[in-house]
Image (cartoon, grey):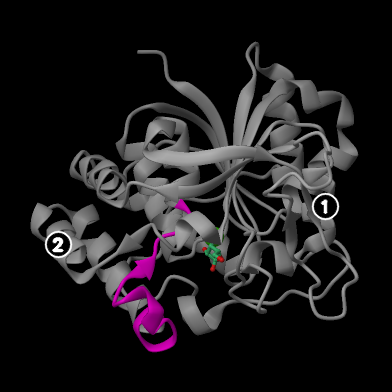
Amino acid sequence: MKKLPILIDCDPGHDDAVMLMLAVGSGLFDIKAITTSAGNQTQEKTLKNALKIITLMDADIPVYKGSEKPLFRELIIADYVHGEMGMDGPSLPDPVLKHEPLSAIEAIAQILTESLEKITVVPTGPLTNIATFLLAYPHLKPKIERISLMGGGAFRGNITPTAEFNIYVDPEAASIVFNSGVPITMCGLDVTHKALVFQKDIEMFREIGNKSGKVVAELMDFFSIYYRRERPELAGGAALHDPCSIAWLIDPSIFISKPCHVAVELTGTLTAGTTVVDFFDVLKKTPNVEFVYDIDRDKYMQLIYNAVQMLP
Ligand code: BDR
Ligand code: CA
């Protein structure tokens, strides 16, 4: 089967790490590059974490360093979820692998320019790199097949009552992406808070018996601490956000979605960084997003399990 060409932009991050494992382990993607965003931790740390996961998987994928900070704002990190190094929990050796000399933005431009086919872009962190690319190389937009991203939400927030972290960190970048005209699939908190990983799933990963299964289990052990303490509504589950954006590309039939118009609030005194999703189409605007809001959790977990089994 022909592999889907993709570019991944991420800020590992526990759930970003599992997203990378799903993408590689599924064997369904031709991953042209991984670029890193500053978000869960600083650029230096998310870059190092991406290189660690690539090393763990023995994957041959070039990694490029992205922007150090959001377009106009100071960086906010999520060390309260992801720890001091951004991917705390498993002890992974420092990567021998180095990132490529080209910047993330130049790399995206070069890869799209040289590609004979359209490429799908998968961002699972703040959208700084993608927005910078779109501003610098607008003529390359038609080379993007779709953007399948994790971010935002219609009915809840996780960093403010209404805003989701990835969008809140760099709302101006998000606004540029949502207004770009490129087809977008958005897996926001509405779906990712149903994409729950429970202790029984964590044990399943541990029992696979390979290095990657052990790392997934140890990542989820750490990640779950925050969710069990701060999100009792999730009944012991942790929201495994980022792999949704890859899982939707693998099998959209395990999700429920609908086309909606989505805009990003930039200046609201209470709601800055909120994605305003016109779920009921009250504005009658042309939809710019395929808005994903439900998931078959068991099938999702099975997809990830199958992928991790295939890894070293
Ligand atoms: C998003 O924020 C980060 O902490 C996660 O990696 C995910 O991309 C969830 O709000
Ligand atoms: Ca992320």
Left or right for 157, reference 274: left
Against 90, residue 132 (above or below) is above
Question: Tag 2: Cα neighbours inside 10 Å, few (<14), some, or many (≥20)?
Answer: some
Residue underneath mark 2: 206
Quadrant housing residue 90: bottom left
Disc assigned to residue 175: 1
Say what secondary structure mark 1 lies in: helix
- Mark 1 → mark 2, Cα distance in angstroms: 40 Å
Q: Position of residue 160 (x, y in %)?
A: 67, 79
Of 131 and 296, which appears nearest the observer? 296
Of 221 and 229, which appears nearest the observer? 229
Residue drawn at the location 82% of the way across and 52% of the way down: 175
Against 209, residue 5 (above or below) is above
Quarter containing the N terminus: top left
Q: Which residues are magenta?
A: 227-242
Ligand 2: give its quadrant: bottom right
Left or right for 73, reference 163: right
Of callouts 1 and 2, the N-terminal one: 1
